[in-house]
Image: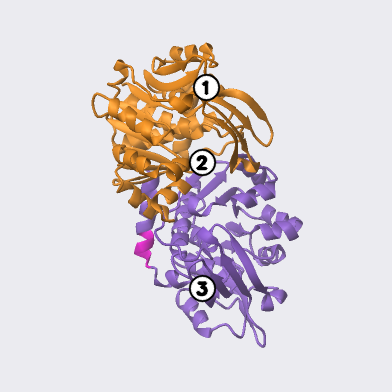
Chain colours: A purple, B orange
Amino acid sequence: MSLLSVGTVAFDTIITPTARAERVIGGAGSYSAWAASFFSTPVNLVSIVGDDFPASEINEMESRGIETEGIDRVLGKKSFFWEGEYLADFNSRETHKTELNVLADFDPQLPDFYKDSEYVLLANLTPSIQKSVIQQMNERPKLIVLDTMNFWMDVALDELKEVISMCDVLTINDEEARQLSGVHSLANAATKILQMGPKYLIIKKGEHGALLFANDGIFSCPAIPLQKITDPTGAGDCFAGGFLGYIASQGDTSFQTIKRAIVYGSVVASFCVEEFSLDRLKSLQRDEVEKRYEMLLGMMRI
Amino acid sequence: MSLLSVGTVAFDTIITPTARAERVIGGAGSYSAWAASFFSTPVNLVSIVGDDFPASEINEMESRGIETEGIDRVLGKKSFFWEGEYLADFNSRETHKTELNVLADFDPQLPDFYKDSEYVLLANLTPSIQKSVIQQMNERPKLIVLDTMNFWMDVALDELKEVISMCDVLTINDEEARQLSGVHSLANAATKILQMGPKYLIIKKGEHGALLFANDGIFSCPAIPLQKITDPTGAGDCFAGGFLGYIASQGDTSFQTIKRAIVYGSVVASFCVEEFSLDRLKSLQRDEVEKRYEMLLGMMRI
């Protein structure tokens, strides 16, 4: 089944308490497309880069079944760049630099063959761009997943609420759920957010796992207790990509499939944080994914 | 099956962002004994109070199957008192006052009929007192559960480590697990702590649930997303009491029973925080416990 993902393809400089990675490949589009491609291809990626972005990375995506015709390459301009530092214990991070570069003019025009994609992932990005992508689809996709963050709640709440009303699944963290709903109790926050349109709300809690709220019930997915965390960047994007990639591979959107997809999304995210950039995803084998999936199921078994 | 619990029976003044409760009944012994008594009686409670402690509370315990012969009542002295304030969102708390009163001289002598208790809960207390209780038992109990906190790691680490080496189950929170082991990864912290003696380590994570680490595997128990939180005081004690009460009711300590006991402990804790003091426990019915137990199982079902 075809899946479309829109998000940044970019460079990151990452500083952690113990290491530093300089101008490595990053961006929500990169992480989510790589994660989805473990389960379902083609992944029709929509993004924008400058002429500094390495062709080898684009080729590597192509060889994994990620379509890159929708990645606009702008000559004479630079790719989006973010530099951030994680503080002790990875519980918070500070942005040192954000250079929008090509992203300032991003107004994606979908290639025609993208417009029939059945599953759509709107990775974290300006809500107006997310909306534009939905509007270019030929038909209403089977499932639209929206990832966003507190920044858009601060600067573009009305546009964000409009996109939320158009999506089926919203993925945010617990603090964002509280901010968006204006209430502290996650149970009450979920009720309010589900009234905004989505059928499913997934609250990402990092090392504490993920919570799914739906009219069908609540599902709690644990996180694997990891021995090694190198860099949390991209974990949320990998979660969303793995989640929708699994759903696309099954071709159905039942509550059962949604729950399994959350476990698979958590698994890919758990690998992502073990190395900087896409490094761990690039060495990851499908049987490792299955092994950790079984481990997570075991942690829930009573 | 008989269960022994040792811990404070005391007064608390609790301040939250929205309310205040003045000199209400508290203490780890009170909460844990009440929680255990939902599942298994007699609960042989060991504690100390002053002559300011209401006889009606003692009578109410007795009527629930909590034995109070082991509660020393000291004439002319006051009960232990704690005043604390929860800050916004209940994520942290400050101690305003601690008056040890009778607790300064607490050197429990177990009534003879307590000494054959098969299940022992050492609620949060001075490690030397916890050790003294173990040493007074006629036979090695079937299961010893130890609850403690960072304070004892700061001021009595050697004594605490000795008691840890004597227990079967240790219950602490995630920051305490990191402090006790000296490592950040919970997976690695658990490995180190299990080498100190316990067969089971339970990491209590409040609104994020609980994690069980054992040689048999890892189990993750979610927390019920609550609509109402009034006062988190006593939640950890109720968890430990409900946990061991359920095990005592089953009379076995298999991995399966331990896992179910964690779910029951979480359920009793989830009710405890809905009201101040023992108020919610006093109105709680067993069928409400079973309903929420089924709800938690449902949250893990895939």
Q: State yes or no: residue A237 in magenta.
A: no
Amino acid type of disc 1? Ser
In the image: residue A75, left or right of residue A242:
right
Residue at (24% x, 23% y) in the render: B138
Image height check: is A167 above or below A273?
above
Q: Position of residue B134 (x, y in %)?
A: 31, 30
Image height check: is A47 above or below B121?
below
Q: What is the C-alpha distance between the residues marked 1 and 2?
A: 28 Å
User: Circle 3 is placed at which residue position?
Assistant: A20
Please tell me which residue lies in front, A221 or B101: B101
In the image: residue A300, left or right of residue A80:
left
Image height check: is A135 above or below B96?
below
Chain letter for mark 1, please: B
Q: Are marks 2 and 3 on the same chain?
A: no
Amino acid type of disc 2? Gly
Q: Are marks 1 and 3 on the same chain?
A: no
Find numbered disc 1 in the image and state the secondary structure of the residue it sits on: loop
Q: Are marks 1 and 2 in contact (CB under 8 Å)?
A: no
Please tell me which residue lies in front, A186 or A201: A186
Q: Which residues are magenta?
A: A285-290
User: Circle 1 is placed at which residue position?
Assistant: B79
Residue at (37% x, 65% y) in the render: A286
Q: Is residue B161 something one can see in this rendering? A: yes
Q: What is the C-alpha distance between the residues marked 2 and 3?
A: 33 Å
